Amino acid sequence: MDAENARQELYEVMNRPREFDVTAEQALALGKRYLDVDNAHLTEIHTDSDYWETVASTDPADGAFPPGLVLDLGNTYCRRVLADGGTIALHDAPAQGWADDPAFDTHGIHCYHGSPIVVNDEIYGTVCFVSESPRTEPFSDEETLFAELIARMLEHELQRRRTAAEIERLDRFASVLAHDLRNPLGVAQGYIDLVRKSTDDRHLTTAANALDRMEELISDVLTMVRQGQTVEAAEAVELASVAERCWQSVVTAESDLHVDADITIRASPDRLRRLFENLFRNAVEHGGDRVTVRVGALGDGTGFYVEDDGPGIPETDRDAVFDRGYSSAVEGSGLGLAIVASVVAAHDWQITVTDASTGGTRFEIDDVVVLDPLTD
């Protein structure tokens, strides 16, 4: 099997929607064939307790390294991968000066190729290719590159799944919290409405406004959590059409919108609407009743911008505008631009804040997939 065919087959394996252990076993089996070794396995290493566990393996249950096998980390070559922070390739361990190593002494493995896997900036484990007998020749650069490609692709998949699980956990937590907050909030709003029917006390109006603001904050928190989830199914979206519809849904007083963006991008329509709604609302809240907002395509074809002719954002504050809680408006929740940032991150775009040509604020969103007019 040549390198090009091996890489192509690996990409096909990793793109199939299957359980992780199945995907990992198929990727390992491909690496085993390409490197011509006895076994390939993915390990999880628990550095706090110094043990090593096989997560996926090409060995059967009665093989030397079956799934679920637990070993003392100190008796494995993998400990050296962790210590060195990179790939170790042994084609004949004793001949390469490893005869007295605890790993060779314990397992008698002559041939070992191991690469580290890092998830969330912490060591997760290793991808290993091993044979009991030595190889006549060292691993070639091409073989090492392919083994490391398998490690990187499994690392990426582990990271993606862990991130998805964390987002799902946060979503459940936020939903439960919102439900528990909205129940007593609804009761309080109901009683205030009853009392206001018999008396016109300005303090009741103040209390009612505060409760309404709490309800808005709850909705904003839920939105922020959900908009941060990675976009899995983007589609072709006409930017101008979405922007114009979003403008109609925002209370804009006597403000104006000008759209000069005859482009189609690949995005989640729902989340793109959230982005525009929050940027428009931010412009109106900070720019006054007669602010003019413009939406256009970036000149280099990498994305789009939203700008206004309001007072602008001081340069010293621009690094903080997307932080949760940042707001210069009296009634702002500080979550609007944080929601924008989460939508941008979920699409793997980039956003920057600069001065608009009219003196206000300009948000530039780039690294966007802008589709050719002939693209379906």
Image (cartoon, rainbow, N blue to C red):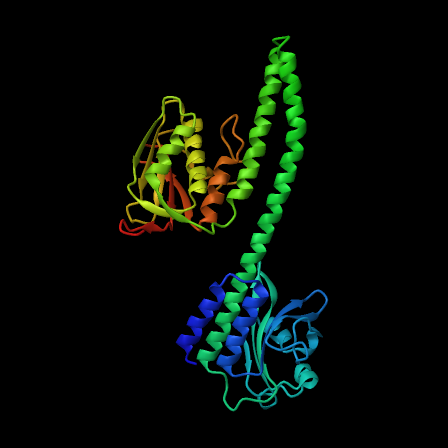
Q: Is residue 86 left or right of residue 185?
A: left
Measured as percent of width and height from the top left, residue 175 is found at 62, 39
Measured as percent of width and height from the top left, residue 357 is found at 30, 35
Please say whether residue 233 is visible from this viewpoint. yes
Q: What residue occupies the far left of the structure in this picture?
A: 374
Please say whether residue 321 is visible from this viewpoint. no
Measured as percent of width and height from the top left, residue 264 is found at 32, 45
Q: Which of 323 and 111 is in front in this view?
A: 111
Q: Is residue 146 above or below residue 264?
A: below
Taking the spot 61% from the left edge, 89% from the top edge, the residue there is: 94
Q: What residue occupies the far top of the structure in this picture?
A: 199
Taking the spot 47% from the left edge, 52% from the top edge, the residue there is: 232
Q: Is residue 205 left or right of residue 268?
A: right
Tell me where residue 250 sits by quadrant.
top left
Taking the spot 66% from the left edge, 18% from the top edge, the residue there is: 191
Taking the spot 42% from the left edge, 29% from the top edge, the residue there is: 249
Q: Nearer the viewer, residue 143 or 283?
A: 143
Q: Is residue 360 left or right of residue 46?
A: left
Q: Which of 144 and 274 is in front in this view?
A: 274
